[in-house]
Image (tube, rainbow, N blue to C red):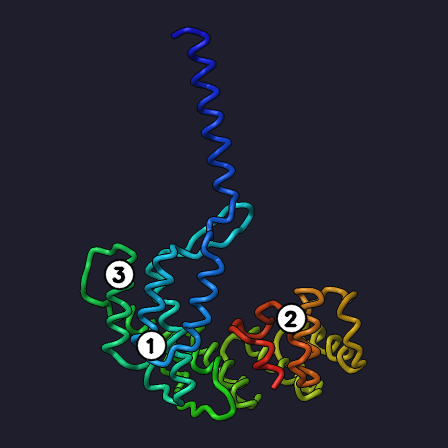
Amino acid sequence: MSKKRIISITSIIILILVVSLIIKNKNPDTHKQERERLLAELNEADTIEECKSISEQIVKLGPECSKSFNTWSCMDLGQFYRHYMISCISSIAVRQDNQDLCSNKEINEEICVRWAELAEFDFDEPSPECVNFVEEECLLAFISKSNENTTINIDCNSFEEEHKRDECFGLLATANLDPEICLNISNDVFQGRCMHYFAFRNNDEALCNYGDDWEIRECKETLDILRNEDVSICENIDLSYYLSSGKEGCYLAFAIFKRDSTICPDYRGTGPFIHKENVCERYAR
């Protein structure tokens, strides 16, 4: 092979590598605006059929991707479809005050069958594990989206996995504004965070005395900051356990302490207590 041909092949290989790196580091979500529009429609859907139709439209846009350490990773289409169907159905359940929508076996089986198709699994029958997963995730979402008019009749002990039971009790405690429910959480760290939410909300330092020693200390130190009632401190707040996201975590804590949702636009995270959507507005009520 001639030297000139070797150089030419090498140049092509280098060009391919450069192009592939550019593609790899470029945001692959080219349908962001359309996706956001459909997600807004999904949250307002009134029927299960609308949930299916909109979810299928979202699936056609391709998987949702996120960047971590300069590398893009994407949720497979099956998970994508199942996630948004659960979100849509739980929203309808809250608006209709009907948690039984989450326990409709026929609908949950349909979701699992479609999930398997999109994920290209080689079976047609919905697995009991998937059907149970859909029901439990829907019920958790139902609690997280609940309001003062929502009727919740969920037995958290019925959840098979301990971490889901703990999540259920935590969501139920904040939904019912009852710190006693936090005591059902088996994980000491999560129980402490649940109680510390009420320490902030009720301005009650005694409720800080749960969790590990360093968590108790951080809860009391954070409560001292909140008692100054100077929200402007959030722009220069020192990092601590409860304010670990910097000023955004600080705004969340003040929204809880003051029960003032107008502070929430300054907050963009998912929260140090329980990671669910609209967390700030929900906790600030």
Q: Position of residue 170 (x, y in %)?
A: 51, 80
Disc sitting over residue 267 in the figure: 2
Do the numbered discs 3 and 2 sit on residues whose CB atoms are within 8 Å? Answer: no
Q: Secondary structure at mark 2?
A: loop
The outermost residue toward the left is: 124
The outermost residue toward the top is: 2
Residue linked to disc 1: 135
Regarding residue 200, the answer to whether it shows in the image is: no
Residue at the image position 50 percent from the left and 88 percent from the top: 147
Q: Position of residue 106 (x, y in %)?
A: 23, 77
Residue linked to disc 3: 116
Q: Position of residue 252 (x, y in %)?
A: 66, 75
Q: Secondary structure at mark 1?
A: helix
Of 43 and 94, the residue lying toward us: 43
Disc sitting over residue 277 in the figure: none
Q: Quadrant of the N terminus?
A: top left
Regarding residue 251, the answer to whether it shows in the image is: yes
Q: Quadrant of residue 218?
A: bottom right
Between the C-alphas of marks 1 and 3, the distance is 16 Å
Label 1 or label 2, whichever comes before in sequence order:
1
The residue type indicated by label 2 comes to Tyr
The residue type indicated by label 1 comes to Glu
Residue at the image position 71 percent from the left and 67 percent from the top: 247
Badge 1 crowding class, 10 Å Cα cut-off, few under 14, some 14 to 19, many 20 or more, is: many
The residue type indicated by label 3 comes to Ala
Q: Quadrant of residue 162?
A: bottom left
Residue at the image position 78 percent from the left and 81 percent from the top: 229
Badge 2 crowding class, 10 Å Cα cut-off, few under 14, some 14 to 19, many 20 or more, is: many
Q: Quadrant of the C terminus?
A: bottom right
Label 3 or label 2, whichever comes before in sequence order:
3
Between the C-alphas of marks 3 and 2, the distance is 37 Å
Of 247 and 3, the residue lying toward us: 3
